[in-house]
Image (tube, rainbow, N blue to C red):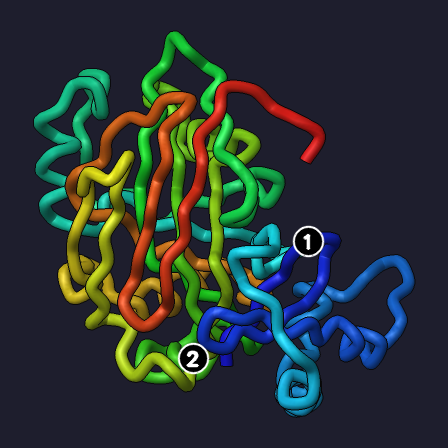
């Protein structure tokens, strides 16, 4: 199954190039009162909602995906966990390029571990990345992102994929500088997810996916998740050694070589095999999104 969030927080099942509005299933979510439970409310109950989503999608006509405004498929992640320098060639380019490392020694993911990004930085494919720090270089980074579907703590690697609800394309936008990663990668609009979630049962091996990012129709990044230094299972297991993972939490797996700057007016086109593609605009100022 593929599902998205669109327009005024509608829920859609995506089939071919059509989105079927199944928002009515959300009436089946239990009511909330403060303090709300840990985890994204939808993903806490996704498995019980899924059959009804499929039934409604069968019964309702679809509209072209191109006619709707795509939001992040996950609305309220408890945390966004990200992996630094998790491809060898990106590690190499980070060590060689002073515009990336600012004179600092770039270490390995084994040294850094993982880091957290602010949920407030999250947008969807139908929104725009804002590059409004003209004195600083702002780079694109394409990544495979996964959504946690089952709560877990200190998960064994051989059990890790059982905790995944699905996969998305992620863009980890980065402002270059000397500040901590969690600051430079958490600016508003700097975390893009989409175009939809592909449920885990449709991806036989997340460690064997080709992907590519183009800027203004020119390829910048192109790789395969088989080149990950820490694969998907190890990332899930490692993150869960420190954090309890809850449904709706997101893990970004890292970016390959080819990172580079974007400017207002640029267009980024991202594609991951078996997941899909999305086109994201870059603009120079914030609006009332």
How packed is label 1: few (under 14 Cα within 10 Å), some, or many (20 or more)? Answer: few
- Residue, x 27% and y 67% (percent of image)? 273
In what quadrant of the picture does the C terminus appear?
A: top right
Above or below 152: residue 224: above
- Classify residue 260 by image quadrant: top left
User: For this rendering, which residue is in front, 200 or 228?
Assistant: 200
Residue at the image position 43 percent from the left and 28 percent from the top: 184
* Horizontal and vertical percent position of residue 206: 29, 73
The quarter of the picture where residue 248 lies is bottom right
User: Given contact means CB atoms under 8 Å apart, are the residues at marks 1 and 2 in contact?
Assistant: no
> As rendered, which of 35 and 45 lies closer to the eye?
45
Dot 1: element: loop
Give residue 7's mark: 1
The image quadrant that residue 45 belongs to is bottom right
Q: Position of residue 48 (x, y in %)?
A: 69, 88
Packing grade of label 2 (10 A; few <14, some 14-19, many >=20) is many
Q: CA distance from mark 1 to mark 2?
A: 25 Å
Residue 200's mark? 2
Residue found at x 22% / y 25%: 100
Specify whether 68 is left or right of 132: right
Task: Give the mark toward the camera: 1 or 2.
Answer: 1
């Amino acid at each position: 199954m593929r599902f998205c969030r669109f327009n005024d927080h509608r829920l859609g099942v995506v089939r071919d190039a059509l989105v079927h509005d199944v928002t009515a299933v959300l009436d089946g979510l239990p009511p909330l009162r403060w303090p709300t439970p840990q985890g994204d409310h939808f993903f806490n109950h996704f498995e019980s909602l899924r059959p009804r989503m499929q039934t409604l999608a069968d019964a309702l006509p679809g509209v072209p995906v191109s006619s709707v405004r795509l939001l992040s498929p996950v609305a309220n992640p408890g945390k966004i966990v990200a992996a630094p320098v998790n491809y060898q060639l990106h590690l190499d380019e980070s060590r060689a390029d002073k515009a990336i490392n600012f004179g600092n020694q770039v270490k390995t993911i084994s040294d850094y571990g993982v880091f957290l990004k602010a949920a407030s930085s999250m947008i969807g494919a139908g929104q725009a990345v804002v590059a409004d720090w003209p004195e600083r270089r702002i780079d694109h980074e394409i990544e495979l992102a996964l959504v946690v579907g089952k709560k877990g703590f200190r998960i064994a690697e051989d059990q890790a994929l059982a905790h995944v609800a699905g996969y998305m394309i992620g863009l980890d936008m980065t402002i270059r500088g000397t500040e901590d990663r969690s600051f430079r990668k958490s600016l508003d609009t700097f975390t893009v997810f989409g175009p939809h979630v592909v449920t885990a049962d449709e991806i036989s091996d997340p460690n064997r996916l080709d992907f590519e990012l183009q800027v203004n129709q020119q390829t910048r990044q192109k790789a395969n998740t088989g080149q990950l230094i820490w694969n998907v299972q190890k990332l899930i297991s490692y993150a869960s050694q420190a954090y309890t993972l809850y449904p709706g939490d997101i893990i970004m797996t890292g970016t390959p070589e080819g990172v580079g700057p974007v400017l207002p007016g640029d267009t980024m086109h991202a594609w991951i095999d078996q997941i899909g593609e999305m086109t994201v605009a870059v603009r120079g100022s914030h609006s009332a999104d």
